[in-house]
Amino acid sequence: MSDYVLFQMWGPFRQSLIAGHLFYVEQAQKRLLSQFEDIEAEADKAADEWLEKSSSRFDPDRHDPGDFYEAANDAGIEFYSLLSDMRDQTSLSVVAGMFHEWDKQFRDWLVREIQHWHHGDVAALKVWSADFGQIAELLESLGWKISSTDYFCQLDACRLVVNVYKHGKGKSLDDLKKKYPEYLEDPFRGSGGAFSGVEHRDHTHLKVTKDQFDTISDAIVAFWQAVPENIFESQVKDVPDWFGKALLKDRTGQPEGKTK
């Protein structure tokens, strides 16, 4: 008796997914993130420009030169702070786009593979609406032991980062604090003060460093490389309840939202 292939990752398709992701990362770094590589020098320039523009107002009989230099320094600090915030927001936006594209591509692949051997819309809709943990549960039931891998942990961290970036306070922020606090910058780092603990950080401290960005990008590549070439029917254990019920509704012609 033949063993039916339920899911198949075609080699050229795998490579096209990886190539598309790497193109996104390369172009995001080249066209967006590289613009923030020397904000310290830009802040110094902003201070100099402020001083130059304000020099016409300087009266040596009435003004202290130190006050003007101090004001110029303040202008430079403000410029640096605003540009630093813009850099962090741009980086988070790029990470969010990277994660959402991976998530959509993977769910689309799952649905198309399911539709080779199963007909109906309920199961497909459930795959699209299932949360990250449910998808991982489904993959585990297919024999793909994904939950213990490093790349899965990085993708899970990225999911929480993106949710916190989008929604601010909430469950994702609480989970990020517990599981991946390194994505919440400590404004009192090194001070050893009472407010240096992760419990005092919130969504305003969310930040993705260049090393973390690279780690997330590498995790997406590792994920696509790890997708099994073939997943056979014999490998499948008990599928998650949510998926099994969706398959049954399709087979019985029962619309979504109805139960017997």
Image (cartoon, rainbow, N blue to C red):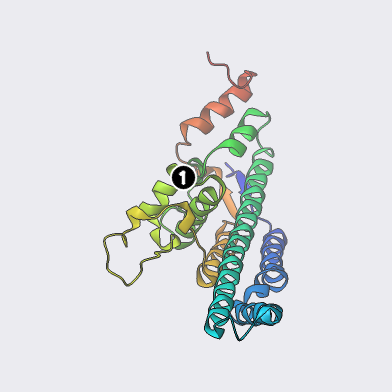
The x, y position of residue 21, in whole percent, is 67, 63
On screen, 54 above or below 136?
below
The x, y position of residue 145, in whole percent, is 45, 53
On screen, 38 above or below 214?
below
- The residue under the point 55% across, 60% down is 223
User: Which amino acid type is shown beneath numbered disc 1?
Assistant: Lys
**Foreground: 217 or 245?**
217
Q: In this view, which residue lies farthest toward the top?
A: 260
**Foreground: 25 or 130?**
25
| Quarter residue 247 falls in | top right
- The residue under the point 46% across, 45% down is 169
The x, y position of residue 197, in whole percent, is 31, 59
**Foreground: 192 or 5?**
192
- The residue under the point 33% across, 53% down is 199
On screen, 39 above or below 144?
below
Image side of residue 55 versus residue 195, left or right: right
| Quarter residue 184 falls in | bottom left
The x, y position of residue 15, in whole percent, is 69, 64
Which quarter of the rendered picture does the N terminus lie within?
A: top right
Helix, strand or loop status at disc 1: loop
- The residue under the point 36% across, 66% down is 188
In this rendering, the count of numbered labels is: 1
On screen, 156 above or below 81?
above
Image side of residue 78 versus residue 199, left or right: right
- For disc 1, the neighbor class at 10 Å (few under 14, some 14 to 19, many from 20) is some
Task: From the image, tell me which residue sits under label 1.
Answer: 169
